[in-house]
Amino acid sequence: MNEEKKTIHVATYDTMADWEVGHATAHLRSGRFHRDGTGYEIVMVGLTRDPVTSMGGLRITPGLTLDELTPERSALLILPGADLWDLGDSLAPFARTARAFLDAGVPVAAICGATAGLAREGLLDGRAHTSGAMEYLQAQEGYSGAGHYVEADAVTDGDLVTAGPTEPVAFAREIFRRLDVSRPEVIDAWYRLFARSDASAYEVLVSA
């Protein structure tokens, strides 16, 4: 992979649910168990470079602004949930950026409230997807993708990954699969270890 494509961009805004992306970003950055043994650079992207405060009280300073972000220099855009997704349209620019990424063939991963933002943008209407509940998405203006809703912990359809708020480990699993960071059996073992505390999975990981 081109070095400039070894960057993961994480949307960053006030009230972001920091725990929803931690499994994915930590393991993507470390490179542990990756096929090539190297990790990704993680860059936080905000509407501005002003610090934001996550739902967990973390103070985060974006390294990039949304208008500086281009799909061509990214391997993936991650959209965490946040209270703000349900409190108006202030985060709509991130959903529009997700559209630009998908149009360019660059993956997007959205979890929790971010799926509502994508629903309002019309990005779920023709793609298999999931969220906290179908009723949650049906309440979003402009959403007409109920026929593509899947009752699952996390769903990947082409370049789009979605998950509900209680599934950060499955969300990470789907991201790893989409980026093909490890062999399928290694990703499965990672999931079994972190989602189910399956000690037998550790043997697969240490021998990877």
Image: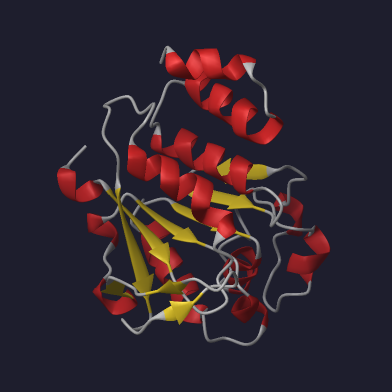
Side of 68 where 146 appears, left or right: right
Side of 125 where 49 appears, left or right: left
Q: Position of residue 63 (x, y in %)?
A: 28, 70
| Quadrant containing the N terminus in the rendered view | top left
- Residue in the foreground of this view, choosing between 98 and 195: 195
Side of 59 where 83 appears, left or right: right
Q: Position of residue 4 (x, y in %)?
A: 18, 50
How many numbered markers are drawn? 0
Farthest right residue in view: 135
Quarter occupied by residue 93: bottom left
Q: Is residue 85 above or below residue 188?
A: below
Rendered image coloring scheme: secondary structure
Quarter occupied by residue 34: top left
Side of 6 where 19 appears, left or right: right
Q: Which residue occupies 58% across, 45% down?
A: 171
Q: Which residue occupies 41% across, 16% down?
A: 208
Q: Position of residue 74 (x, y in %)?
A: 28, 55
Q: Is residue 38 above or below residue 102?
A: above
Q: Is residue 28 above or below residue 162?
A: above
Q: Position of residue 134 (x, y in %)?
A: 79, 59
Q: Which residue occupies 23% across, 48% down?
A: 5
Q: Which residue occupies 38% across, 66% down?
A: 100
Q: Is residue 49 above or below residue 151?
A: below
Farthest left residue in view: 3
